[in-house]
Image (spheres, grey):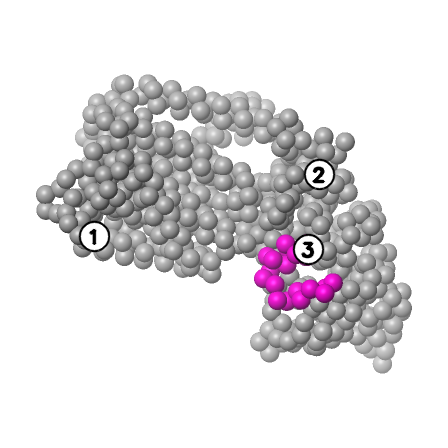
Amino acid sequence: MTDDALRDKNGGMAVAPSFRLQRWRVLVAVVAVALAIVIVPLFLNALWLRILISSVIFTIAATGTAVLYARLGLVSLAQVALVGVGGWVTLRMWHATGLPFEINALVGAFAAGVVGTLIGLPALRMRGLYLALITLMAAAGFQILVTGTQFPNGGTGVLGAAVNSVFMPRPFLGRSDTAMLRYVCVIAVLAYALIEANRRGHSGRAWALIRKSEACAMAAGVNVAFYKAWGFALSGFVAGLAGGLLAGTIGVLDATTFPASESVLLFALTVVGGAYNWIGQIMTGLLFRAAPAFLNDIGVDGNLAYVIFGAGLLHAIITAPNGIAGQMLDLVARWTSPSVKR
Amino acid sequence: MIAIGGISVSFGGVTALNKVSAIFNDAIVGIIGPNGAGKTTLLNVFSGFVEPDSGHIEIFGANLLAMAPYKRARWGLRRSFQTEQIVDDLSVGDNLRVVLDSLPDRKRRGNVEIAEALQFVGLLEKAGILAGTLNVFERRMVEIARTLVGSPKLVLLDEPGAGLRRQETEMLARMIREIHDRFGAVTLLIDHDVSLIAATCMSALVLDFGERIALGPTFEVLNDPRVKAAYLGVEDAA
């Protein structure tokens, strides 16, 4: 009897009502995203297609920042630099080998995963402000490095930088802007799935215990160092993937896209968007790339976005620790369950 | 058999444990002593959170202190904490599963082991719900169940009775007495509640200011004048 009571038909643990609700929610989310992928690109002009592609790409990068922050309580301020690493390796690979985009981007993602793990090694000993500072220094280091060497664009030698750029072609499935937007959306869904699979498995349980207390995790047999490093590897991997997609969209990359300040901004917007829920990182991507463009579009200086971001961060820290996504979900919960009154 | 040999721990100038040696042969052993006696420090040496200045611990022939802390758990060491460490946003079952995750070859029997441990503490029907919804007693029970999955060899319980009502403490005592028969593990129990120790432990080690002042069958130890003095204050003995 004991065994039957614990297993549902999938062989997993018995599913409580709250989990059923989540499944229903996941289904709605999948349908919504699928519709958005098919329909939204049809109604956008060229500029907004590009902006949305870029927003989705940084949504992918933000899922990495969010997994470190929400699951492990770690602050990484090097995510945009890792996007740059992924982009650099993807371009280097293509100019050297001419292999299909997907292979180059995967190599780039793995490379960024390795670099991310190296940056995260201090996290095995420290956390909080000191770790944040170390990751920020790594981001600054990348900025200096890449400003000096530039991105590979068909030149000779290991660095492969030339005066006249050779553009890397778009991925086969993303030749037009409309197709590219759909392409990055599909990759984003895969990145989300990768992180969700980790969250639901061994890693997620280990992370949850580490966040609770490292002593408790060790006492339960969790290899704390490994699972922290794994968090950084995963976060770096999705950042690298985003970098490959950025390179794949534009064909060349420029050092000015990856200053350390952008890494800080991406982290701040991860908090504003909401790190604990997947919708949050979509918000992060939109705030990071679409919000400044939107302000420009309606005739306001796009730099004003930074002021809004600052206010948003204050708001998030003081009243909404779950970010915009958390507030949206609260709202939905209030609509769907009228018994809850506040 | 558990053999503790000459364990010394000092924090700065404070000696927390001073050459404590003891041999435990019983299935349930109590560790008692007044506040600051070094009980939790001794448990932390077992767990690997505190590295002793000297000494060794041998359990069933294994050199415990040579293993990394997380490997001790994989070897079969389990513990509960004074303030329970249950993860609110994991299900009750997943709070236990995390222990099995790090053990090889547990996939097939995992659910059975979790079910057995949860049934033992009376929480089987709550396996799928989030641990954050449990009450104080249930949370304590989840933590005890977590020490029982994955073939434990030695279970360390650090004040499991703290904050429980009398009825709950009696249930807890019944459970602790059954651990060895049901799961094959030896239990080391710390508690301020001497009645819980008396109700469960065959033998007890008494610490005071980091020194061993008594070791032996529980009823003898509790009647030892030095133990009484340590608990009631030295002026009684003077």
Q: Residue at x 20, y 37 (%)?
A: A168
Which sits in the foreground, B209 or A180? A180
Q: Tell if the residue under mark 3 belongs to the same chain as the one under mark 2.
A: yes
Residue B62 vs B160, above or below: the answer is below
Q: Which one is in front in this view, the residue at disc 2 or the one at disc 1?
A: 1
Mark 3: amino acid? Gly
Which sits in the foreground, A64 or B173? A64
Distance from disc 1 to disc 3, alpha carbons, whole Å, reads 51 Å
Magenta range is B59-80
- Mark 3 and mark 1 in contact (Cβ < 8 Å)? no
Q: Residue at x 73, y 70 (%)?
A: B4
In the rendered image, which residue does mark 1 sit on?
A158
Badge number at residue B44: none
Mark 2: amino acid? Val
In the rendered image, which residue does mark 3 sit on?
B76
Q: Quadrant of the C terminus of chain A?
A: top right
- The reply, left or right, for residue A46 in relation to residue B116 is left
Place of residue A171 in the rendered image (x, y in percent of width and height, measured from the top left): 26, 31
Q: Residue at x 32, y 56 (%)?
A: A138
In the rendered image, which residue does mark 2 sit on?
B112
Q: Secondary structure at mark 2?
A: helix
Chain for mark 3?
Answer: B
Which sits in the foreground, A280 or B23? B23
Chain for mark 1?
Answer: A
